[in-house]
Image: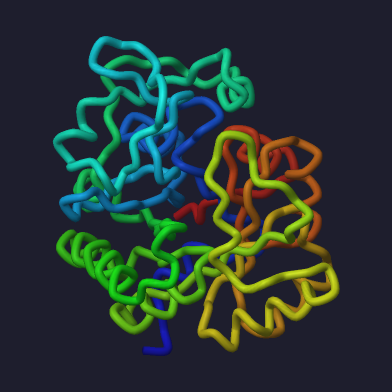
Amino acid sequence: MTTFPQLDAFRRGPGLIRLVGHRGARGVMPENTMEGFEFTLACGVTLLEFDVAITRDGVPVITHNHHLTRSVARDASGAWLQGEEPKLSALTWDELAQYDVGGLDGQSAYGQRFPDQAYLNGVRIPRLRDLCDLVAQPQHKDVHLMLEIKSDPERLQDATARAEIVAAVIAEVRSAGLTQRTLMHSFDWNLLAECARQAPEMPTSFLTQLPENDADVGEDEATQAGPEITADTYNTLPGLVAEAGGKLWCPYYLDVTADSVLRARELGLIVAVWTVNEPDDIDQMIDLGVDAIVTDYPGRVQRKLLDRGQDWLERG
């Protein structure tokens, strides 16, 4: 398949730069939760980025880290997790559903990054099926998914495990009838090759980050799943993504340049930069002419675009 209708939702146009809600709207709502996704959709944001991992019993769930994180998860008594953080792949779906992920521990380093995030109670890690069911409703027919499959660092080289994870994720998307509204998104280029093999109807989106930019506090490192990248080889990345069959290139916003955006565009790639939160940085990305801005604060990007006479949606 050479044409992908879902790409148009992520491509810029005259007076139009696309807006992607990162993990919903992490800056203001609990990340990767149904409450966060519903809020984001209510704000008129129709592109959702989120992370998927697999439980011990093979259920695709929406969460970023491979462990339940003590700065995010509370037990049945409402207490923050103590001691060793349970691994997602060691828990069944029923066990995982006992934890509350509706807020952040404000004393933790991760919690201090998002002081404006709402604190809710009784919020659970959703299954991929839950989000697909929401998006499949008629009122959300214009919503598209940037689905990032997380690579388990302990199983990076396990081709069988990789194929099983991809198959489980694809089955949920297909069951909901959302293949033409979904991108497969990852730092793991081997995993993306497996996605293209199993689901040629869904385009692949390649995440990259230069190693000198440290991983964010409180988050699992993901860049080790991809190819080795240096400042000297960075400008070759658009070409490598295109050669690998990618349709989107998703660089870390501090890495992107006018030249690299131009090169990507020459190769027919869509450029979606992550994760852009500060007003000056949002302005810079608009000036560079990227196709899409991935952000924890959708409202900030909306305001910037409107102030500059631009939009994030095609208005009928």
Q: In which quarter of the image is residue 16?
A: bottom right
Residue 153 is left or right of residue 131, and the answer is: right
* Nearer to me, 156 or 41: 156
Counting from the top left corner in percent of width and height, residue 131 is at: 27, 46
* Nearer to me, 304 or 95: 95
The image quadrant where one finds the C terminus is: bottom left
At x 55%, y 69%, the residue is: 206
At x 36%, y 53%, the residue is: 143
At x 34%, y 84%, the residue is: 197
Residue 146 is left or right of residue 134, and the answer is: right
Counting from the top left corner in percent of width and height, residue 262 is at: 77, 75
Q: Quadrant of residue 179?
A: bottom left
Image vertical order of residue 41 relative to residue 103, above or below: below
Does any portion of residue 117 appear in the rendered image? Answer: yes
Does any portion of residue 148 appear in the rendered image? Answer: no
Counting from the top left corner in percent of width and height, residue 281 is at: 77, 43
Q: Residue furthest front?
A: 83
* Nearer to me, 270 or 212: 212
Residue 276 is left or right of residue 181, and the answer is: right
